[in-house]
């Protein structure tokens, strides 16, 4: 036993020594090339603007605040897309299980089509085909209280002086309300419909994993088909489906990094701008890795909490 512990300790020392040597060597090389090795750049003036920010931000703010904006944008977009993808995915999944042949085939076409198209093409489709040809602000479209133009979607929001459509039509811009930039909208739509295709298949597999005898026994006891699905089939199906569902939510959070290709100010886009301006590649990449790991752990912790609060994970 003592020999085994000694060997494990020796292995840890060797691994730690290799990491330390690599870090020291990288620091010497960076210093020789006059590349910054500290994190002092975070408190320098950013000098660039962002197309979407949930907190006040201007080019006079620091790089650290710009990174905070990127993290918040990534977190909010991932959360909204996760909720929408769940709703769409469950609807498509139930449609695939429907006894109606046409509805089932239509759902199958949705799943097979969207799963086999790369996510980047989804994002470009929503951004280029649907969002960029929108009208100017003075010609904003009104969709049930939501104003739509080439600067984004404007939603009513209490206390922000939401304007009427007539007031926006003759103005140079829309003031008030909650704005969602075209880039953010394209990212949410792309992540939602792409991830929903996988969630639909996960739900279908979970339902089909429940033995048919369970439903037959429930109906023999007098439960209606709706009660059978809600009280007998779905709890068991979700117990099977929850682990792969968690993986999809984690993948959605990481897939949001593709937002840089459509110009949305997420963590990757902001950090890429910072890297280009400061040259602090090692520090910026390290920050990105740590923040994405934190976002993934936050998503995992939230899903585990939901699992614990429910009886889906019960054995």
Image: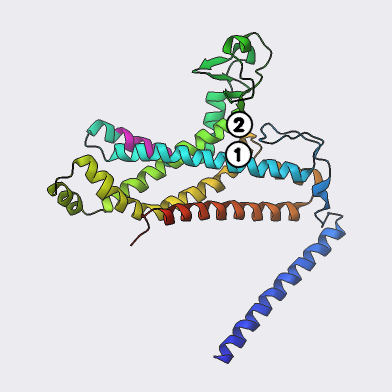
The residue that appears at 66% across and 35% down in the rendered structure is 54
> In the image, 37: left or right of 156?
right
How far is mark 2 from mark 1, CA to CA? 8 Å
The residue that appears at 39% across and 40% down in the rendered structure is 89
Q: Which mark is residue 195?
A: none
Which residue is label 1 attached to?
A: 259
Q: Give residue 158's position: percent from left, percent from top.
A: 59, 25
Rendering quarter of residue 33: bottom right
Q: Secondary structure at mark 2?
A: helix
Q: Which residues fall within the magenta stretch?
A: 106-114
Find out whether the residues at labels 2 and 1 contact each other: C-beta distance under 8 Å: yes
Q: Give residue 61's position: percent from left, percent from top.
A: 80, 38
> In the image, 1: left or right of 72?
left
Dot 2: within a 10 Å radius of its alpha carbon, few (fewer than 14), some, or many (20 or more) residues? many
Q: Of the two numbered discs 2 and 1 on the same chain, state the one appearing first in sequence.
A: 2
Q: Give residue 270's position: percent from left, percent from top.
A: 70, 41
Which residue is label 2 attached to?
A: 183
By secondary structure, the bulk of the magenta-drawn segment is best described as helix
Rendering quarter of residue 193: top left
The residue that appears at 52% across and 18% down in the rendered structure is 145
Query: Could you tell me if residue 118 is visible in this image?
Result: no
Identify whether 268 is placed above or below 301: above
Rendering quarter of residue 132: top right
Q: Give residue 204's position: percent from left, percent from top.
A: 31, 46
Which residue appears farthest toward the front when viewing the image? 159
Which residue appears farthest toward the left when viewing the image? 220
Q: Nearer the viewer, residue 4 or 126?
A: 4
The C terminus lies in quadrant: bottom left
Q: Nearer the viewer, residue 156 or 68?
A: 156
* Residue 67 in magenta stretch: no
The residue that appears at 74% across and 56% down in the rendered structure is 282
> In the image, 306: left or right of 90?
right
């Amino acid at each position: 036993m003592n020999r085994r512990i000694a060997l494990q300790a020796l292995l840890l020392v060797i691994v730690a020594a290799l990491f330390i040597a690599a870090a020291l060597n990288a620091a010497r090389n960076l210093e020789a090339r006059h590349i910054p090795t500290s994190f002092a750049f975070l408190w320098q003036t950013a000098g660039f603007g962002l197309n979407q920010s949930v907190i006040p931000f201007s080019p006079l703010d620091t790089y650290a605040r710009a990174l905070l904006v990127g993290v918040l944008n990534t977190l909010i977009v991932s959360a909204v897309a996760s909720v929408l993808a769940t709703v769409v995915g469950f609807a498509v999944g139930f449609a695939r299980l429907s006894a109606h042949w046409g509805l089932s085939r239509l759902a199958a076409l949705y799943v097979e089509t969207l799963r086999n198209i790369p996510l980047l093409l989804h994002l470009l489709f929503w951004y280029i085909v649907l969002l960029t040809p929108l009208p100017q602000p003075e010609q904003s479209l009104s969709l049930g209280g939501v104003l739509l133009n080439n600067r984004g979607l404007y939603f009513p929001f209490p206390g922000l002086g939401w304007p009427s459509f007539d007031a926006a039509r003759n103005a140079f811009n829309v003031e008030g309300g909650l704005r969602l930039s075209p880039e953010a909208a394209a990212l949410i739509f792309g992540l939602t419909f792409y991830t929903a295709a996988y969630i639909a298949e996960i739900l279908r597999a979970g339902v089909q994993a429940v033995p048919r005898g369970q439903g037959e026994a429930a109906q023999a006891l007098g439960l209606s088909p709706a009660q059978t699905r809600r009280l007998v089939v779905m709890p068991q199906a979700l117990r099977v489906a929850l682990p792969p569902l968690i993986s999809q939510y984690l993948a959605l959070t990481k897939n949001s990094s593709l937002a840089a290709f459509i110009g949305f100010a997420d963590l990757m886009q902001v950090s890429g701008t910072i890297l280009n301006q400061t040259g602090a590649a090692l520090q910026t990449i390290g920050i990105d890795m740590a923040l994405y790991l934190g976002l993934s752990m936050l998503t995992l912790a939230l899903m585990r909490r939901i699992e614990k609060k429910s009886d889906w994970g019960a054995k």
